[in-house]
Amino acid sequence: MVTADRMHRRRVRCRMPRPERAGCAPGTGCGCAAVKAPRRVPLRCAVVALAAVATVDPGWAQSPGASAGATNFPTRSLRLIVPSGPVGPSDFLARALASRLAENLKQPVTVDNRPGAGGTLGTTLTARAAPDGYTLLVMGLNNYAINATLYGSLQYDPLKDLAPVSILAEAPLLIAVHPSVPAKSVAQLVALARNHRKGLDYASGGAGTGPHLAMELFLERTGVRMEHIPYKGAGAALNELIAGQVGVTMVNMTAGLPFVRAGKLRAIAVTSAARAPSAKDIPTIAESGYPDFITTGQHFAVVPGATPRELVARLHGELTRAIHSPEVRERLAAEGSEIVGSTPEQAAQVTREEIARWAKVIRRLGLTAN
């Protein structure tokens, strides 16, 4: 189990993340993990149930806008802010959507990577943008929820200053190791960490990201230690892992699976309840002796909180149309993601629940980023 002394040391490391190594390309770390403890209804099922009861939170209710504005929208280019660098799951999803949105809307759609501070820099930029529908944030929902508690002095109110449009997709997380690490299963990895005199290092896309907290919960659950090495995004963490500078990572499957298929990394397990359809040869943590450890990474789109409801509805319709297009669906499925496509009201309710859920986890683990 995790001792108070151990968590104190880990809290200091999280507050002072090691700078990204020279030569590493910036990446993303917004593949978010929602550890279902206690076990909860899968998101796709919850979305159906929420449809009958979901209501808009007063803090997220958009002010009425001119119907003509929504009808004529858009008349210029749109910007999708990704609060992390290229390579990771949020960037992958945003770029898949951007090309389809541009074709459907007959307007340019750009992806603007704004990494830093666990995703809060790009989130702040979105919260301060004009509420005109031309700026959207695409990021890990649980990273957004984690930041609400992990950072004590955010420059935005996560329940008022941004409005969810839709939970777009979800994918499991993946535990992967460098090929030199002598472990091919969860049991072997746990045994190696327990017997390794100096402990193993594990990389994450940043202190406080979903994969970081999910890995901390995995270590607590298995009773072993690994040293956390945070980087500025999943891409940078994967670069270091591939180079053999660290031994282990937990990363969104969308970001990690291509490197497993290329033979640059070895997959240990995925964190979903069942094996991913796109990688049925990779076992789950649940079937590897820890049936209560089930984790998924969800990604959503949000806009500035004062965006008129007519524009939110229009954006929701366009995002739904884009994500269900055959080419986007196939791209997501190939990397292990599944489409969710919730309504704004459902996304708002799930976000509130995730903020409350992760607040309990963060306080129990004693983590902070300030």
Image (cartoon, rainbow, N blue to C red):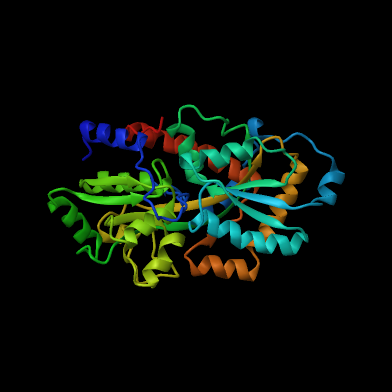
Of all residues, the one furthest to the top in this rendering is 153
Which residue occupies the foreground of this view, 5 or 51?
5
Horizontal side of 347 relative to 212 (left or right) equals right
Horizontal side of 92 relative to 186 (left or right) equals right
Which residue occupies the foreground of this view, 83 or 138?
83
Of all residues, the one furthest to the front in this rendering is 22
Residue 349 is situated, as x and y percent measured from the top left of the image, at 57, 40
Q: Residue at x 33, y 33 (%)?
A: 364
Q: Which quarter of the picture shows residue 267? A: bottom left
Which residue occupies the foreground of this view, 117 or 10?
117
- Image quadrant for the N terminus? top left
Q: How many marks?
A: 0
Decide if residue 174 is in sight here. no
Q: Which quarter of the picture shows residue 130? A: top right
Q: Residue at x 48, y 56 (%)?
A: 88
Above or below — where is 160 with respect to 85? above
- Image quadrant for the C terminus? top left
Decide if residue 158 is in sight here. yes
Horizontal side of 348 relative to 198 (left or right) equals right
Residue 156 is situated, as x and y percent measured from the top left of the image, at 58, 31
Residue 221 is situated, as x and y percent measured from the top left of the image, at 26, 46
Above or below — where is 90 with respect to 363? below
Which residue occupies the foreground of this view, 43 or 53?
43
Residue 17 is situated, as x and y percent measured from the top left of the image, at 36, 40
Q: Residue at x 23, y 65 (%)?
A: 180
Q: Residue at x 39, y 49 (%)?
A: 211
